[in-house]
Image (tube, rainbow, N blue to C red):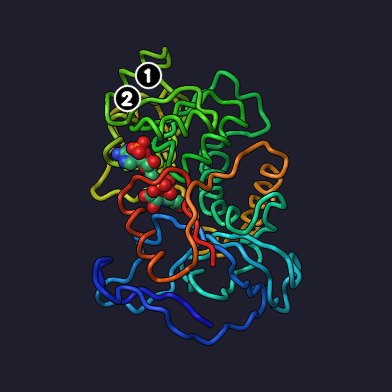
Amino acid sequence: MKAIQFQPGASLDQPNAALEVELPTPTAEGHDILVKIEAVGMNPVDTKVRPGADGEPKTLGFDAAGTVAAIGDAVTLFKVGDSVYYAGDITRPGSNADFQLVDERIAGIRPKSLDADASAALPLTSLTAWESLFDRLHIDPEADNAGQSILIIGGAGGVGSMGIQLAKLAGLTVIATASRDESAAWCKELGADHVVNHRESIPNQLKAIDIPQVNYIANFNNTENYWNIMGEVIAPQGRIVLIVEQVGTLDIGGPYKLKSVSVSWELMFTRSLFKTSDIAQQHAILTRIAELIDTGKIKCTANEAMAPLNVENIIKAHTLLESGKSIGKLTIKR
Ligand SMILES: NC(=O)c1ccc[n+]([C@@H]2O[C@H](COP(=O)([O-])OP(=O)(O)OC[C@H]3O[C@@H](n4cnc5c(N)ncnc54)[C@H](OP(=O)(O)O)[C@@H]3O)[C@@H](O)[C@H]2O)c1
């Protein structure tokens, strides 16, 4: 099969930074399904795990949609021919290839109302947003959350776009951050009640909309830049979720202690990395996301599509992601 691999230490502007190579098609065993890739979704993690100078060539790509071509002997959730989508596993070869193995317990049947291309936009950001809100912030999606507020930092990004919609579905008042007219309009379109600009004073803008403190914060962007601001605007006994690795150390004292704030990390890869006993929860979340899409309760966040899946488009996609200016999701059809 063909695969696109990044070369160790190569920067994006170097010729041969990524190459199309021929690799053996893998065999499905145990809980694995072998998927014929039809489309991939792009994520900042692709750029973060490009190999360093001492690394090995890597087949990257996390989000994918495709068709089950073969199944391992322990597979119970899928059969050959099923249309699936998934975000993959950070320890295994990725989706920038003709075929990929994935554990059935982290895959789902993709939405019936979407093609493969649009479906590939969903898994990684949906899983991250879902786990952030419902597993880490412990928001009960079935409860009456009216009157509870959430600040979503980085509202127009891939994760924020799904976070806004899931928080609205749970009945929260959603304040999203965006810094450009087009990203602010995107957040509003997805249901944000208010949009504040993260390049201006967030505390002042929250006071201006009469929500000086929020019950929850989902920080889907830079952790340390917003650390003091989050300490200021979180309500007493509020909860904060972080998804972006910090560079320095964080002082958990000060307002965080005075207000008894709970801070959680969310890593979408934790369940597959540690094969946690609830790993199949990701299958359940992707099944629920497909239902929410098919019943029109949430919208697909695909916003830009490329084709075909080749070296040139992969390099273009990595360059766009590194600009930090993506709105919604970028997909590439094979
Ligand atoms: N822990 C996990 O499991 C996990 C999962 C997924 C993603 N992540 C990480 O989370 C981050 C976001 O991922 P993503 O897919 O949502 O990224 P993305 O789609 O590339 O995010 C782009 C958005 O970031 C916003 N942005 C740029 N600078 C900002 C700033 N200083 N403050 C707030 N927002 C800013 C931009 O909004 P404006 O144009 O309005 O400025 C843009 O719309 C990445 O670092 C990614 O690696 C972690």
On the image, the x and y values in percent for residue 236 come to 42, 23
Q: Is residue 34 above or below residue 288?
A: below
Relative depth, front residue between 66 and 124: 66
Q: Label 2: state its secondary structure.
A: helix
Using the rendered view, name the quadrant where residue 311 is placed.
Answer: bottom left
The amino acid pointed to by label 2 is Ile
Q: Quadrant of ligand 1?
A: top left
Question: Which residue is found at the position 38% from the left and 68% from the top?
Answer: 312
Q: Is residue 129 visible?
A: yes
In this rendering, the answer to whether 262 lies above or below 32 is: above
Q: Quadrant of the C terminus?
A: bottom right
Q: Is mark 2 within 8 Å of ligand 1?
A: no
Residue 190 bears which disc, if any?
none
Q: Is residue 131 left or right of residue 249?
A: right
At 27% across and 24% down in the image, what residue appears? 201
Q: Residue at x 68, y 47 (%)?
A: 288
Picture quarter with the N terminus: bottom right
Q: For mark 2, what is the residue? A: 202
Give the Cα separation between the discs numbered 1 and 2: 6 Å
Which percent across, then down, holds residue 135? 56, 43
> Which amino acid lies under the numbered mark 1 shown in the image of this protein?
Leu
Verify CB contact (< 8 Å) between mark 1 and mark 2.
Answer: yes
Q: Point out residue 194 in the picture as x, y percentages from the top left corner.
A: 45, 22
- Circle 1 residues within 10 Å: few <14, some 14–19, many ≥20: some
**Circle 1 — which element?**
helix
Q: Which residue is mark 1?
A: 206
Compare residues 204 and 281 and report the one nearer the observer: 204
Front residue of 122/113: it is 113
What residue is at 43 percent from the left and 83 percent from the top?
21
64 to 16, vertically: above or below = above
Query: Which quarter of the figure has residue 73?
Result: bottom right
